[in-house]
Image (cartoon, rainbow, N blue to C red):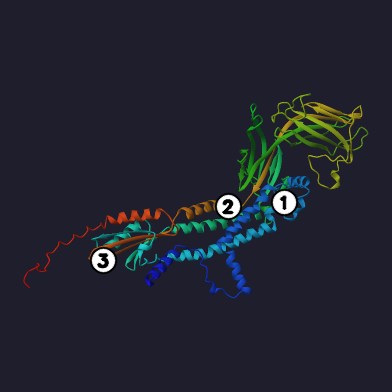
Amino acid sequence: MSNTDITDERDLGRAGEQLSTAPREEATASVPAMGVIGWARWFWRQLTSMRVALILLFLLSLGAIPGSLIPQNSVDELKVQTFKEAHTTVTPVYEKLQFFDVYSSVWFSAIYILLFVSLIGCIVPRTGQFIGQLRGRPPGAPKKLTRLPAYTTWRTDADPGQVHEAALGILRRRRFRSHVVGGAVSAEKGYLRETGNLLFHIALIVMLVAFAGGQLFKSEGGKLIVEGDGFANTITQYDDFKSGSLFDNDDLAPFSFDLQDFVGTYERTGPQRGTPRTYEARVTYSEGADGKTKKKVIEVNKPLVVDGTKVYLNAHGYAPVISVKDGRGKEVYRSSVPLLPIDNNVTSTGAIKVMDGYKDKNGKKEQLGFQAFFVPTFAGDGQGTMFSQYPGLDYPVLALNGYYGSLGVDSGLPQNVYQLDTSDMKQFEDSNGDQLKKRLRPGETMQLPDGAGSITFESVEEWASFQITRQPASGWALTGAVAAIAGLAGSLFIQRRRVWVRAVKGPDGVTVVEMAGLGRSESAKLPEELADLAIALHTVAPTAPDPEPEPDRPSEEPAEGAEK
């Protein structure tokens, strides 16, 4: 290979290298001796490389899998406890690996922070180099354009200056950055490709920051409300409440709402019998202490939104209205008791606890407890088990059995409102010495033995549970996701390429036009685009006609035999 060819190869290499803004790897000879500083620089370069960023992103996605498959304490502690009781073998392993608190675990946080640092380390040098390229101009043309992947040439009678001027105009109209350098027109297009690449990585950082901010400042809690009751957005009103480590109680949005009515209708026939058709909570709400009352219908995935706080409809159930009288006929208890659904037909269980006001026939204060099993649609005696046949209130039946003694609520230990602690209680017995139990329809009463009083199933009300959530950075996370998609699309579908046009006078005085293109990657569109540009330029500098062949001249040598 000649020296000229080697020089041309170097020129083409430089032109191609400048199409990329990726940080350049330094030569091995320039790496410092591997001391503390050397190892620190090596670690930093590895961490901020695109390869490591992609590996960390993959590990982050992989680490989120346990969080989606295993119950999390941050979402539902009851499910976590149920999981632990059902899987005693793997529970100790999961606890050591922090699989029940994935998103706040040490290893997930480490991946998260390393990815954050890696992305910043990738973006900063690329941004600086890209800005430098935007401020610069496309490089001059290589000496031999014929070596480029897309090339065309023709001869024209137009002057080289006219060809260059026409080429500049055509390229600039097509949004190429172009100028004349070294006797040729240099043009470049597709800077949005690198812009999209940078936008994608910046958007990932925005999403990471938004996710972290949302976890630090978030608040979420649940509230079960019976028809006619309400809720004010204060900590003491929540049934359960969780928040981020930087959350302040003053961040709670001041509002309140009342559940006026819950409307649920269900499919009556066919294979989808019991499937909800209408499932909505009708509420009235007000913002602030003196806000105007407004009406709103909350549906699944259609929350009530107040000052950045969203109120979601979570679940629905029934609350039988129960009244209890003591032996003297005095009503000591009347309340709607929410019961917990256990199947899709809203078969429900729970506990009725009479803690104060009750006295037995001898005037002694006692506490009563009743285990309740409710079905909104009872199949009837002899028609199978005591499970609901339909989620609507077609034939409600409440099954009860009772206890008397101490409920254990004075011990100071928390209790499940849906369960009855009978360790310090005795069961009521019927005349045969069996446990007292009875099925009641609305309006029916179960008499307690030995003049202990009675319990009446008055009616049925409905309840709805709501999740009240405030995620401060959710808007930023959505913006980052949209920007990441837009940036990824730009980096995938926009091609960065360069075009050169050279026009010089040939030995015969006719201008020779050369056009060539170079892309960052192989693409069939580059030759097509170059052909389109060549056609546009050809209208200004058309092909010159071929030169006419010279006529044969008579030979000046004397014929054979002529005089010399």
Q: Earlier in the sequence, mark 1 or mark 2?
A: 1
Identify the residue under disc 2. Answer: 477
Q: Position of residue 312 (x, y in %)?
A: 64, 42
Residue 160, compared with residue 98, is above or below; it is below
- Residue 505's label in the rendered image is 3
Q: Position of residue 268 (x, y in %)?
A: 65, 27
Residue 181, compared with residue 530, is above or below; it is below
Question: On the rendered structure, is 4 left or right of 226?
Answer: left
Q: Position of residue 138 (x, y in %)?
A: 39, 64
Question: On the rendered structure, is 367 left or right of 173?
Answer: right
- Residue 220's label in the rendered image is none
Q: Quadrant of the C terminus?
A: bottom left
Identify the residue under disc 1. Answer: 100
**Three-letter code for the amino acid on which mark 2 is drawn:** Ala
Q: Earlier in the sequence, mark 3 or mark 1?
A: 1
Callout 3: helix, strand or loop?
Answer: strand
Q: Quadrant of residue 417?
A: top right
